[in-house]
Structures are given as C-alpha cells and as structure tokens.
Amino acid sequence: MGTSNAVDGESALISAVQAGDTDLVTILLHEHSDSDYVDAAFCLAVRMHAGHIAQLLLQYGADSGQSRPDDLIALSEAVDSGSPALFAALLDHGIRGRYPESELLEARDLARRWHEAGVEAELRRRTGSRDAVVRRQVPDDEYNSVDECTLGGTTVRDGHGAILTYIEELLGVRTSFEDLMDRALTIADQNHPTWGGVTLLLANRRDQETWTAAAALRTHPDPSRRLFGAEVLRCTHLLDWSDEDAFADPALDMFTSWSAEETDLAVLTEVLVALGEHRDPRAEVSLLPHAGHPDARVRRAVAQGLSALSSPPAFSGDARTALLRLMADPDAEVRKTACRVVAEGREHDPVFADAMAAVLDDSDRLVQLSAVYGLALHNDERCVEAARLLGPPQRGSLEEEGYLDAVWRYEWRRDGR
C-alpha cells in the first residue's frame, strides 16, 4: 500500500489527520482531495487513536483491507483507549475476519473490566497517581460524545460500555434487558455511545419480551429509566421495516397517552419525537397541545413531528396555525425546523410562501437558508435574489449546499432546461 511513502509525501489530507482537524478532513474528503492517500490516512488515524476521523475515512471509501497488521493497532489497545469509534473502525468489515474469536473474547473481558471498575478507578490502578483526574467532554464520532479522562500522563475515554456492547453483539451474546439498561444508566446521557449502543441493540431485537420490559418503565419514578424505556420503544417501531409493522399501533397507543402525562422535559421530548414518526391523525392531536411549550426542545419536537403528517394534500387547520407560529418562534432551531417542514410539505399555499419570505432577513443564516430552500421548492421566484444575497455555501457545509442547490434546481425548472 505504500503507507509510509504516503505519510512522508505532501498531502493536505495526511496533514489534516496528523493535526487531528476533523472539520478539515471532512472538507477535503467531500471535495475528493488527495483521494490517493485515503487508505494511508485511515491507518494513520487509527494509530493516532482518532476514531472519529478513521470512521469518516471509511465513509469516504478508505479500504481497511489494504492495511497491513503493523499499519494499525491491537484490539486490546483500542479497548484501552475507551473510544467506541476507534474500536469499531478496527472491526470494519474489510478486516473483521483477521480477528479470531479468542481475541474478541479477550477484548470483551478487558472492556468489561474497564466498565465495571470505572475509568477513574482503573486509571488510578494503572498509573498509581493520586492526582486529580482531568475530565472533559469530547466528540467520539459524528453523533456521540464521551468523557476523556487524563491522569499521570495517560488519557482514556469512557466508552468501554459501548465497546463491551458491540463485542457482545458480534459474539452473539444475548445480554439481559436489565443488565443492558444498568450499563446505559451508568452514563445516563442520550448522546453517549454506551446509551445509544444499548438502546439500538435492544430495539433491533424487536421481540415481545423486550417491548414489555421497556413499556413497564413508563411509570417508573426515575426519569432516566422512563427516558430509556421511551427510546427503546421508539426505536423498536422506527427500525421495524417488516410489512407487518407489528409495533406501530402499540407504540402509537402508548405515546399518545404518555404525552399527556409526562412532566420531565427530556422524556416528553423523546415521546413527542416518537409521535412524530407516525402518520396518523392521533399523533397530530397529541403533538399540537405542546406547540406553545416554554421549552424550545419540546417546541422543536412538535415542529419536526408535524412533518410526518404532511403527506396528505394539506395540513389540518390547527397544524397550519401551529407551523406558522413556530416559523416565528424565538428559538432559531425551532424556526429552521418549522421552515423545513413547511418547505417539504405537499401544500404550496401562498400563506406559507409569504411566511418563509418573512424570515429571509432572519438573524440566523441557517433559518434564512431554510426559507430560501422552501421558496425554491414552492417555485417562488423570491428564492433567487435571496440566495444571491446570501452568497455561496460555507466550505464543507453539506446542509448549506443542499439548501442552495434547491435554488439551482428551481431555476432549471423555470427556464425549461
């Protein structure tokens, strides 16, 4: 593969990986810069314990199978790092077959020791240091964050629970619902890979035993357990692609009544997100009472949830009123979400177009762009001048590119090309 030559050569991608600059790596990959170096960059990212970057490189075509064993690191080293993204990169499909079951079992036992002891305690045992542990939150991959702990010159992330869950799944081990829930609740953070890995694993079981255990948490006094149960139930329905869709009606019945009773903001938001994934008038009836909720996260869930109900020819009158109100919400993320829902709805009412035009001078650029996007989809000429004033998309922003590309497509349609 010539990894050493590639690293020694002049390459913007290699330099970005060496600098640990995830944003620049993303931009260069999107622009297909230095594509000849992508395999070497993957090996370098793994050796640097840069799991997020290694995952990005795999997404953009890095072939892990081209690496030699000495180009990478041992599974045990990846476990010790505590980075689920790094560990998963080492078990990419291109090289997964290199690892015998015995090595996976050793990795599982090591991950369990870290998880059960706790990162700080295990760090103290290994380093012998009595100093204070320095802890900071860092992104581990595109969607999840972990705590990174440093003591005695050693830095470790706290993702061992996620690594353990991943290995158990590979080995075909069916860990009990209670043990997996306890594992997730040691973190109790929806943005942590341990929580996400556990909830997705349970949801993918799609069996009555798991459904019943998750549903029983609805009345639990601990909001963290209610949140866990709600997410497992939501994802069980969301990930069921079978024709039977056996969990659709039970989920809708569960979440419609739950939404009227829940007092915890995080749990209520999860319940409303779940409702928004159902194309049923009962979901809208349960969403709309929360459109004026004082918390922006709840209002954002309502706005997003109404999008699933936009496939009929028109929004209901109450949904129209709510969306117009949410497009003028004090929170920029709520305004952007409502704009996008209206933009992608099938109802091209001039009232909606005028509401989007009204936020073209919004203080938030992404709200402006979502309005431009909506006007373009609604074949409204006002999108052209607004896009010109906003200028080109920011480099590397796929979201901005997508919004502005809609204007180009509108002009193509308008001019009959």
Image: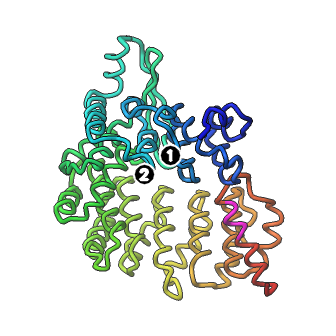
Whether residue 401 is in magenta: the answer is yes
Q: Which residue is mark 1?
A: 64
Q: Answer above or below: position of 197 versus 401.
A: above
Q: Answer above or below: position of 75 versus 319.
A: above
- Answer with mark 2 or mark 1, whichever residue precedes in sequence: 1
Q: CA distance from mark 2 to mark 1?
A: 8 Å
Helix, strand or loop for disc 1: helix
Q: Which residue is mark 2?
A: 93
Which residue is painted at 48% across and 30% down in the image? 136
Q: Answer above or below: position of 409 versus 391.
A: below
Residue 149 can be seen, yes or no: yes
Q: Main secondary structure of the magenta part?
A: helix
Range drawn in magenta? 400-405
- Tell me where residue 80 appears, x and y as whole percent: 38, 29
Q: Nearer the viewer, residue 383 or 72?
A: 72
Task: Say few, some or many: other residues with alpha carbon within 10 Å of mark 2 (under 14 / 14 to 19 / 20 or more).
Answer: few
- Tell me where residue 260 appears, x and y as whole percent: 32, 66
Q: Nearer the viewer, residue 325 or 306?
A: 306
